[in-house]
Amino acid sequence: MADTTPMVRAEGVSKSFGSHEVLKSISLEVMPGEVLCLVGPSGSGKSTFLRCINHLEVVNAGRLSVDGKVVGYREQGDKLYELRPKDAAKQRRDIGMVFQRFNLFPHMTALENIMEAPVRVKGVPKAEARARAQELLARVGLGDRADYYPAHLSGGQQQRVAIARALAMDPKLMLFDEPTSALDPELVGEVLDVMKGLAASGMTMIVVTHEMGFAREVADKLVFMDGGVVVEEGDPREVLANPQHLRTKAFLSKVL
């Protein structure tokens, strides 16, 4: 029987910074193996929502669960208790995150960057971590770049190393926060190709992106956010071809 537990479930999630409400009661679900693309103007709350999913930001109201477990809290009866930072970090291991900026360690080679977390966080033996890192570099098309330092890799190559690094922790969910927005246009395709491969392999993914072609081709669901709310969601091809909401129409007319 197919698993009917959503990989991600947001129920009435709200988040404020001071008096500024960035997320206003967001509710959505992503099933295992699904790819959800979040689109919308800058400042609409997309990146904040991603950061809430792996508890880099604490929600002010509502609840977020990943694979049936509430993020950042433990449930006891009908009460929620915030996890200690150490336990929250443990929960975060199952969630891979790729940012706009690659955030690679500059003093480590591509291979060492990928090995670091499994060895340090999970206690994986070095030889095993090295073999797995080599495998992942090959998977993202960089098998011949193992000994290169980030400074000697292009932006697209650095971002592919960052994806391999996230995969090294064997996550059940991958979050991408505009992974191609810092790249030169000709390097965007190589990163999107790796992401397409991941989607094809059944990885559950939430992608904040401006790449509408990728959303149309790869996503199972498209969510358009604006002003901290979900304005419209549905099949990407339908939403992009025939948006129902005026706000969605206005946004898509500028980006398509």
Image (spheres, helix red, strand yellow):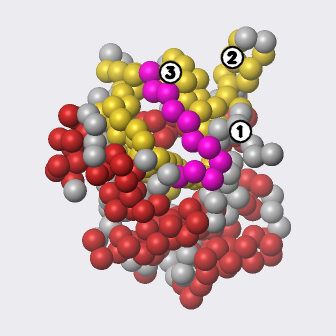
Which residue is identified by label 1? 4
Q: Nearer the viewer, mark 2 or mark 1?
A: 1
Q: Quadrant of residue 211?
A: bottom left
Question: Label 3 sits on what residue type?
Answer: Gly
Which residue is identified by label 2? 80
Question: Label 2 sits on what residue type?
Answer: Leu
> Dot 2: within a 10 Å radius of its alpha carbon, few (fewer than 14), some, or many (20 or more) residues?
few
**Secondary element at image label 1:** loop
Residue 27 as seen in the image, left or right of residue 233: right
| Sequence-earlier tag: 2 or 1 | 1
> Does 197 appear above or below 253?
below
Classified by dominant secondary structure, the portion drawn in magenta counts as: strand
2 and 1 marks in contact (CB < 8 Å): no
Return the residue found at the far top.
Answer: 78
> Dot 1: within a 10 Å radius of its alpha carbon, few (fewer than 14), some, or many (20 or more) residues?
few
Residue 167 place in picture, x, y as percent: 63, 62
Spatial distance from mark 1 to mark 3, Cα to Cα?
Answer: 20 Å
Quarter of the picture holding the N terminus: top right
**Secondary element at image label 2:** strand
**Secondary element at image label 3:** strand
**Residue at (43, 80) in percent of width and height:** 152
From this viewpoint, is residue 121 visible? yes
1 and 3 marks in contact (CB < 8 Å): no
Circle on res. 12: 3
Q: Nearer the viewer, mark 3 or mark 2?
A: 3
The residue lying toward the viewer, choosing from 170 and 122, is 170
